[in-house]
Image: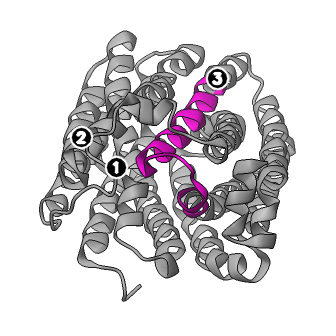
Amino acid sequence: MKRFNRNVYLFFIATSLNAIATGVFAVVFNLYALSLGIRADTLGGILTAGPLAQVAGAIPVGILADRLGHRQAFLLVYTMAGLAYLAQATLVAPALIWAAIFVNALAISGDFVVRLPFLAANTDNRHRGLAFSASMVLASIATSVGALLGGLVPSALAPIAPDLTTAYRWTLWGAAALTLSAALPILLLRKQGSPTRRTLRLRSYLGGIGPNTRRIAFVEFFGGLTMGLALPFANVYFVYHLGTTREFFGAVSALVVLPAVLVTAVAPLLATRLGRIRTISGARLFMPAACVILSLTASPLVGAAAYCGLRAFFMMGQSQWFAFSMEASDSESPAATSAWLNITYWLGNAFMTPVAGLLIAQGNYRFPFLLAAATGIMGSALTHLYFRSFDASGAGARAGLATG
């Protein structure tokens, strides 16, 4: 990590600040919405705004990033996301909350789309996999800190807040301020031209992608299906199904960082020894096992262990998957590959989040995790089926896949 340049370190600071805010919202927002009297099935519809915005915004944001460059794109992302977070925590009408979530997710889609080519441009081939793993590890640590704060801060504010809803709102406002502050380290980035041509147009994102990129995007769709079923209502599952407290779920979300950091930190070593695709496929096989446990258990402690495992192996697999995607991409622009990863993941998420909300509104907390297990197995199988030759022939697999 000592070989990373100044831009990478500044980006790590910025993305960590935003990740703390993400962790707070992951613990608090659903409970805040329910405290407003919003039903779980209505909330499921509201939460689809995020995935839909990610799908709609990925390509336009990618084109904009190609034109603005990384620094200006990140400034726009964090400013817009922070203001939308403020609106999301202030508005009470479901339609307006939906709009605020849409704008926030539209901005955050830029964070993902720009992040991959930014890290690729600021690292060499030897250290790129480590950079992606470090990015995921630091984001996980910061998200865990945010989750812990999300569990504790509303209780700390209870003596001065008129009601629990207000304590939730104040907590969310603080998180929004953190996202806005992420723009400060971005201002210190050394200006650097985008690694792609500034003349890129929409056709580079549609007609300019090859078979590798299409397969990468299709596999990512199954990741979106899995996590769309497993994650959006995790706090509701723990509080209303397993009977835990908000503080318990916040602590569990914070403790995710321990196994996540461990498995993600060793992922580059495993990828070197076993092969990157074997490492990714293996990590993705552990996720369905965790989902099955979550569907069957009535124990908060067993559920907590399974939830930590699910999040940890998802992060491990994704860190290596992103690095692989940048190397194996055959699109005209790295941002185009990043955009399509974002589109297909969030498209899968958009399909399944309302399904999970509808099932939970009917009191069925188990079936979403069984569905998540099935889609997770498919994602692991497709990863191995499409890209196993990459482990056998290394860089030469790219050419073979392109003609296969």
- Label 1 sits on a secondary structure element that is helix
Residue beneath the point at 48% across and 47% down: 338
Stretch of the chain drawn in magenta:
323-352
Q: Nearer the viewer, residue 112 or 238?
A: 112
Q: Earlier in the sequence, mark 1 or mark 3?
A: 1
Q: Nearer the viewer, residue 322 or 312?
A: 322
Could you classify mark 1 by the number of other residues whose Cα lies within 10 Å: few (under 14), some (14-19), or many (20 or more)?
many
Callout 1 touching callout 2 (CB < 8 Å): yes
Residue beneath the point at 33% across and 39% down: 200
- Label 2 sits on a secondary structure element that is helix
Callout 2 touching callout 3 (CB < 8 Å): no
- Residue 59 location, x and y as percent? 41, 32
Residue 272 in view here: yes
Magenta region includes residue 342: yes
Q: Hey, which quadrant is residue 396 in on the image?
A: bottom right
Total marks in image: 3
Q: Nearer the viewer, residue 255 or 387?
A: 387
Residue 164 in view here: no
Tell me how far mark 1 sits from mark 2, CA to CA: 9 Å
The kind of residue on which mark 3 rests is Phe
Task: Say above or below: 75 vs 278.
Answer: above
The kind of residue on which mark 1 rests is Ala
Q: Which residue is mark 2?
A: 82
- Residue 313 location, x and y as percent? 69, 61
Residue 351 — which label?
Answer: 3
The kind of residue on which mark 2 rests is Gly
Residue 21 — which label?
Answer: 1
Tell me how far mark 1 sits from mark 3, CA to CA: 25 Å
What type of secondary structure mainly makes up the magenta span?
A: helix
